[in-house]
Amino acid sequence: NFLVVSSVRTSSYRLLHHRETAIGLRNSLIRRKYPGSAASKTKVAMSSLNDMNTFNKNDLTHCPKITLKNGLHHPAIGFGTYKLGFIPASASSAASSSPSITAEEAVSNAIKCGYRFIECAQFYGNEQQVGKAIAECGIPREEIFICSKVWTTVIEQGADAIRAQVEETLSDLRTDYLDLYLIHWPVPGHHVQAYKTLEELYAQGKFKAIGLSNYAVEDYQELKDSNISVPPVVNQIEINPFLYRKNTIDFFKKEGIVLQSYRSLRDGKAFNHPTLVKIGSKYKRTPAQILGRWCVQKGFVYVPKSAHIDRMIENAQVFDFCLQEEDMEELDKWTTPEALNTFLELYRKCVNRDTSKDGTLDGVKMQITVD
């Protein structure tokens, strides 16, 4: 049902298609022409927001929804908040990165653009800023889908710490419930009990749904075998054509678990890939839009992130065209053995990250489904 809905071209899409492409290309040219001017960037961004007002209100706001197995309707696109306004100490490239905009500003702009799914996490360290933007946006709470995640340190500390963290997140985000709450990493020896604590909080009405993040097949099987009472509805993992773990994805789909995709745009590191540029030229679309459309067309929840309004808009223009099968198949082939090895190394590092076992392989599953 989702793929049918997401590929329908309404009359408004047809009218806006060429205009959207022209605006996107115009903004890209201006960014290249004035790369060092903050004033120019702000002017371009605000111009983009004004120019695309019709698109923002009517298209992105009412994007397709994916029905989770508990009946909750999940927007097919969201706005990620990682490294917006705050860089976690243990984040990759933390030392060389600096926030270019506050999370409050970025989320406020994203909501103005029409995003209605906001992806958060304890680890991101910016939920107070995000909550302020949501509270002051003027959009009814029930029209915004909010997801957060509990971090490894709290997972290791146990049930009481998790309950306290959930209350802190609710307070920071200025809401009395979350639409979705996830276990951020399957911390060895602790993630199963952590999930069962989420089940209790779910029963209390703190969340509309609960799920997982960064779970391998084997982590999920361990959880499932522990007699959980509330099945997870989502697994958030990195997905893009450069890390397309088809066997893992197919497994979770068969379990009825929807995949949320982070790093959908690969942090912009592949935008100059010659074949990606070529495919983009074919559809008169940017590389970001091709990667986003691939994600949507596969049925994943697409979660792009940007601090710039024009890119927020550009990233969202993925529902008014379809990639031909030959191009989908080409994109499907880009995952290399090296990419899978890099994923495996990251998984082994991160399941114990920031815990008392940080830097060790204590309890880490050494044999998991990698592809």
Image: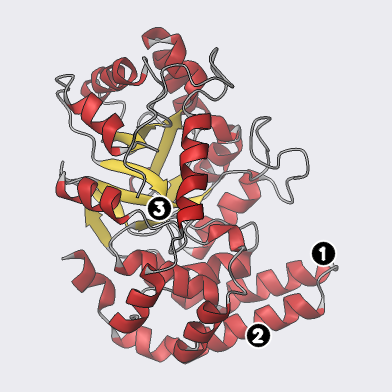
User: Split into 4 quadrants, where in the image is the N terminus?
Assistant: bottom left
Q: Amino acid at mark 3?
A: Ser
Where disc 3 sits, the SS reads strand
Q: Earlier in the sequence, mark 1 or mark 3?
A: 1
Whole-Å distance between the Cαs marked 1 and 3?
A: 31 Å
Q: Which residue is mark 2?
A: 26
Q: Amino acid at mark 2?
A: Arg
Q: Position of residue 241 (x, y in %)?
A: 43, 64
**Residue 270 higher or lower than 257, as above or below:** below
Q: In this view of the protein, which residue sits in the foreground, 156 or 146?
A: 156
* Label 2 crowd bin: few (<14), some (14–19), many (20+), radius 10 Å: few
Direction from residue 76 to residue 264 in the image, left or right:
right
Q: Which residue is mark 3?
A: 261
* Label 1 crowd bin: few (<14), some (14–19), many (20+), radius 10 Å: few
**Residue 38, which numbered label?**
1
Whole-Å distance between the Cαs marked 3 and 2?
A: 28 Å
The residue drawn where x is 46% and y is 40% is 344
Where disc 1 sits, the SS reads helix
